[in-house]
Amino acid sequence: MTTFLNKKRSVPKSGRLLFLLAAFFALTTIVEPAPPPPRAARVEGRLTAEPVALDPGDPARGRVGALIYRRGWVLRSDAPRFGGLSAMHVENGAVTAISDVGDVLRFRLPGTGDTGRVAITALPVPYGSPLRKRNRDTEAVAVAGGEAWVSFERNNLIARYRRSDWRLEAFQRPEAMRRWGGNSGAEAMVRLPDGRFILFAEGGGTASRVLLYAGDPAMAGTRSVEARYRRPTGYRPTDAALLPDSRLMILNRRVDWPVRLSAKLVIADLPAWRAGAVIEGREVATLEAPLTVDNMEALSVARENGRTIVRIASDDNFMRVQRTLLLEFELLPERAPQLRRQ
């Protein structure tokens, strides 16, 4: 979970009073506490999906950068723990999302079967008391077969779960991750088909720290080397996924006062597997006003019917002034001709 008030921005002296007033107003009237620790391992709720346009002021608009907009929704549920989406995996119309309060949310994409329900499962916490929010701060997920790897940001650990019942199988607090910040740690994770892993820290100077793992990061003794990700100026990575052509797609988010949100999608080659390697990509799309955008944190990529489908979702921070968005795009092939705005 990334609370906007935790992001440090330089503010001119003339604007400091206004900034403090805005921060106080946000803390006292806008920011709602995260839901309490779960009392049951699994709950269900109703799910509604309200369609949204890419550009509310120009509903016919169908393209942003190298992405063609297919459809999108504002998701809502009567389940009190619904929200806070930080990462997701979409497969055959089924969404498995991780929230930043340590829950797994499972539901169907709107229009693909039984889309009116959401099941929410509380993950077993591998470290510390499950009653403390910091021990439930899950930010990234990687799925392979019957297993899922989840990153816990504030404790900078990686846990592996059995997907059938979300039983905890293994976890590690890697020494190399202990230097990562408590609120800017393990934010994105990619598992390669050969079993290697790439982990991105959210923060770290002008470039984000990256760990390249030779195998399962939840197992003791797995070798890793440190790399860097040169992110777009002013942005931080919030999720990443592997494209069908074995390149990386990285979702980056920016927060500016007064609460202006934007997101950039970047495509990068896989790094050389050595210490000091650098990941640097090419921007393919920017979501910013007047386009539909929120605190975009979750990314999933799949090959469907010969097309590369990109889905991104937002973390509403459990705040009334934000939304849980789920947006779906098609990634255009390289060197595709410029399409007339549609």
Image (cartoon, rainbow, N blue to C red):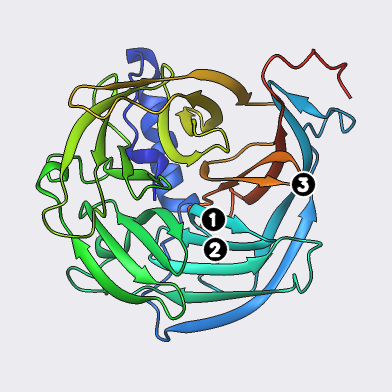
Cα distance between the residues tagged 2 and 1: 5 Å
Whether residue 125 appears in this view of the structure is: no
| Residues packed near mark 2 inside 10 Å, few (<14), some (14 to 19) or many (20 plus) | many
Seen at 24% across and 28% down, the residue is 227
- Element carrying mark 1: strand
- Element carrying mark 2: strand
Seen at 77% across and 46% down, the residue is 305
| Residues packed near mark 1 inside 10 Å, few (<14), some (14 to 19) or many (20 plus) | many
Figure check: 10 above or below 3: above
- Element carrying mark 3: loop
Q: Which residue is mark 2?
A: 96
Q: Which residue is mark 1?
A: 89
| Residues packed near mark 3 inside 10 Å, few (<14), some (14 to 19) or many (20 plus) | few
Query: Which of the marked residues, 3 or 2, is nearer the chain's N terminus?
Result: 2
Seen at 11% across and 54% down, the residue is 221
Three-letter residue code for mark 3: Asn
Are the residues flagged by discs 3 and 2 in contact, CB closer than 8 Å? no
Query: Which of the marked residues, 2 or 1, is nearer the chain's N terminus?
Result: 1
Three-letter residue code for mark 2: Thr
Residue nearer the viewer, 70 or 214 = 214
Task: State which mark lies toward you, 1 or 3.
Answer: 3
Residue 320: mark in rendering: none
Are the residues flagged by discs 2 and 1 in contact, CB closer than 8 Å? yes
Seen at 13% across and 58% down, the residue is 220
Q: Which residue is mark 3?
A: 305
Cα distance between the residues tagged 3 and 2: 21 Å
Q: Quadrant of residue 64?
A: top right
Three-letter residue code for mark 1: His
Residue 322 image point, x, y percent:
58, 48
Whether residue 225 appears in this view of the structure is: yes
